[in-house]
């Protein structure tokens, strides 16, 4: 995973974010700070659109795919407000 946009989300959840990276085609799960995304759609091998769950603070997005879980990167984190 290389980036997430936007990088800020409402603490009540429900915001849509774009996750960019590679190897997403058969992704089986997306989570933010260990909490499952409300929903997600794999748009291509390089992009996922996800709906962020409620939360607070800073949460790192993780994508699970057949090749394993993505590495937690600061560039793939969201800040709740």
Image: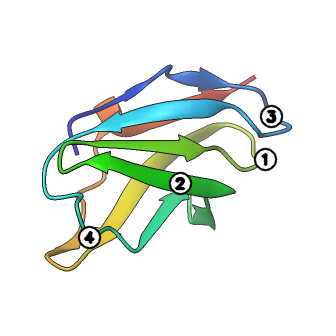
Q: Is residue 6 left or right of residue 48?
A: right
Question: Between tags 3 and 2, which lies in front?
Answer: 2
Q: Is disc 4 placed on a helix, strand or loop? A: loop
**Residue appearing at x 13%, y 76% in the figure:** 67
Residues at marks 3 and 2 touching, judged by CB atoms closer than 8 Å: no
Residue 50 percent location from the top left of the image: 53, 45
Q: Is residue 17 above or below residue 21?
A: above
Front position in the image: 27 or 72: 27
Q: Earlier in the sequence, mark 3 or mark 1?
A: 3
Q: In this figure, which residue is indicated by the disc labeled 3?
A: 11
Query: CA separation, marks 2 and 4?
Result: 12 Å
Query: CA separation, marks 3 and 1?
Result: 5 Å
Q: In this figure, which residue is indicated by the disc labeled 4?
A: 26
Q: Is residue 44 left or right of residue 14?
A: left
Q: In this figure, which residue is indicated by the disc labeled 1?
A: 54
Mark 4 closeness class: few <14, some 14–19, many ≥20 residues within 10 Å = few
Q: In this figure, which residue is indicated by the disc labeled 2?
A: 40
Name the quarter where the C terminus is drawn. top right
**Residue appearing at x 63%, y 44% in the figure:** 51
Q: Is disc 3 placed on a helix, strand or loop? A: loop
Mark 1 closeness class: few <14, some 14–19, many ≥20 residues within 10 Å = some
Mark 2 closeness class: few <14, some 14–19, many ≥20 residues within 10 Å = many
Query: CA separation, marks 1 and 4?
Result: 25 Å
Q: Earlier in the sequence, mark 3 or mark 2?
A: 3
Query: CA separation, marks 3 and 2?
Result: 18 Å
Q: Is disc 1 placed on a helix, strand or loop? A: loop
The scheme the figure's colours follow is: rainbow
Point out which mark residue 25 bears: none
Mark 3 closeness class: few <14, some 14–19, many ≥20 residues within 10 Å = some
Residue 80 percent location from the top left of the image: 69, 30
Q: Is residue 66 above or below residue 20?
A: below
């Amino acid at each position: 995973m290389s980036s997430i946009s936007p990088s800020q989300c409402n603490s009540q959840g429900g915001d849509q974010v774009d996750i960019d990276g590679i190897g997403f085609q058969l992704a089986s799960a997306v989570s933010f700070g260990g909490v499952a995304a409300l929903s997600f759609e794999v748009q291509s091998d390089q992009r996922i659109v996800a709906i962020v769950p409620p939360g607070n603070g800073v949460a790192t997005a993780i994508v699970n795919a057949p090749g394993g879980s993505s590495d937690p990167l600061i560039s793939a984190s969201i800040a709740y407000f």
